[in-house]
Amino acid sequence: MRRILVTGGAGFIGSNFVRYWLKHHPRDRLVNLDLLTYAGNLENLRDVESREQYRFVHGDISDGVLVEHLFREEEIDTVVHFAAESHVDRSITGPSAFIDTNVMGTFALLEVARKIWATDDTACRFLHVSTDEVYGSLGPNDPPFTERHSYAPNSPYSASKAASDHLVRAYGETYGMQVITTNCSNNYGPFQFPEKLIPLVIANALEGSPIPVYGDGKNIRDWLYVDDHCSGLEAVIEKGRLGEVYNIGGSNEWCNIDIVQLICQRLDELQPGKAPYAGLITFVSDRPGHDLRYAIDSDKIQTTLGWSPAHDFQSGIEQTIKWYLENREWCEHVRSGEYRQYYEQQYGQRVG
Ligand code: NAD
Ligand code: DAU
């Protein structure tokens, strides 16, 4: 039986992971430490919050006293570290929070784990959940990122995640800490905050607002259904080798404009508007430093740990669109308040 500290478990991937883990490992203890920033939402966890094995703690990963107390009280043997500032556009307008949480917060967590686990020879592990963006941008014909690809982050977000990856690696090498890092491609699925491309397109289409596409829409991302990311993390927790890095991806590359068109077409069928939703597509000025292409080579996790994604893109995007159609109230809640201000700041000034 594991005793797991999940950080950032009220966010998009974290909440999907909490649900996934409680379903597949009902005897494990799961403590969710989350600061509840704009991206953290306890509504994401309503269906599991009363489970006996689950505990939510409202707090900051940078609060060493709190984290140490939790480690001791809950006898934590596994950390799954999601907590982060995660949106590239926000990192461009306000990088400071990214350094605070992604770099200093990860450092604070590592320090507590190092202190508490130093005398422990049981199977402790610190799983650091990171991103493919640390590798920078690929050209159209480059091979996908392997774990040996050099780091070349291009945004304050990816630079802060790269810094955290380096700290995690250093704690493994220097102190012999029980660390593993995963670098995953773009996730999509239920409970994703509608500042990210897929939920933003769905939400804007349904309210008849312009659908902003950056630049020429030809940038490419490699999309993975969030549950497949969770099963990849499960494989790494159970079978991954300490000190290793595993890339996780969907081998599913799409141009942004093709995804946007696909969502509009499917919405035309499921929830027809007055006119085709594609008429709302608006090309706007590009994201500064916009990476052209990401693609992950997940051969290592597939061959050494036996993981592979269970969802193809057709079924994953279908489930996702339907989830947003069935959960419009959730979307309205998270888009009220701070989101409106953010949206105006982010998109008000962008011209086509
Ligand atoms: P998210 O923004 O939806 O959620 C982040 C969560 O962290 C929120 O619940 C927030 O309240 C919490 N948080 C932020 N600062 C905190 C702090 N100081 N202390 C405690 N909690 C704090 O992010 P996400 O998209 O779910 O991403 C989760 C992790 O996965 C991140 O580390 C991200 O870099 C990584 N990742 C994301 C993707 C993706 O496509 N979304 C892909 C690869 C890796
Ligand atoms: O690759 C993994 C990363 O994927 C994660 O580490 C990040 O946390 C996550 O946010 C995501 O980063 P991206 O920048 O790729 O995701 P986003 O949804 O913001 O944008 C996807 C693409 O769509 C990107 O090329 C920018 C473009 N885009 C995005 C928005 C929000 C638009 O064209 N219009 C938009 O309004």
Image: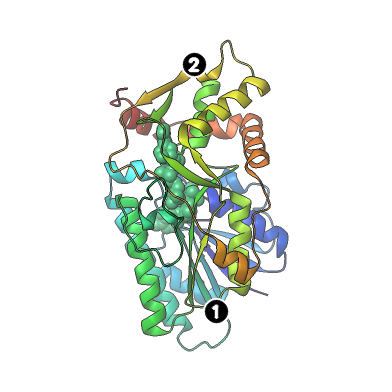
| Residue at 48% across, 32% down | 200
Residue 19 in the image, given as x and y percentages of width and height:
65, 54
Task: Out of 226 and 51, give the one closest to the viewer.
Answer: 226
> What label does residue 76 carry, if any?
none
Name above or below for residue 176 compared with residue 12.
below
Looking at the rendered structure, the kind of residue marked 1 is Cys
- Residue denoted by label 1: 124
Residue 151 in the image, given as x and y percentages of width and height:
34, 62
Q: Where is ligand 2, by quadrant?
A: top left
- Residue denoted by label 2: 279
For residue 311, side relative to residue 138 (left or right)? right
Task: Out of 287 and 168, give the one closest to the viewer.
Answer: 287
Q: Is residue 301 visible?
A: yes
Q: Earlier in the sequence, mark 2 or mark 1?
A: 1
Front label number (2 vs 1) = 2
Q: Quadrant for the C terminus, please.
A: top left
Looking at the rendered structure, the kind of residue marked 2 is Gly
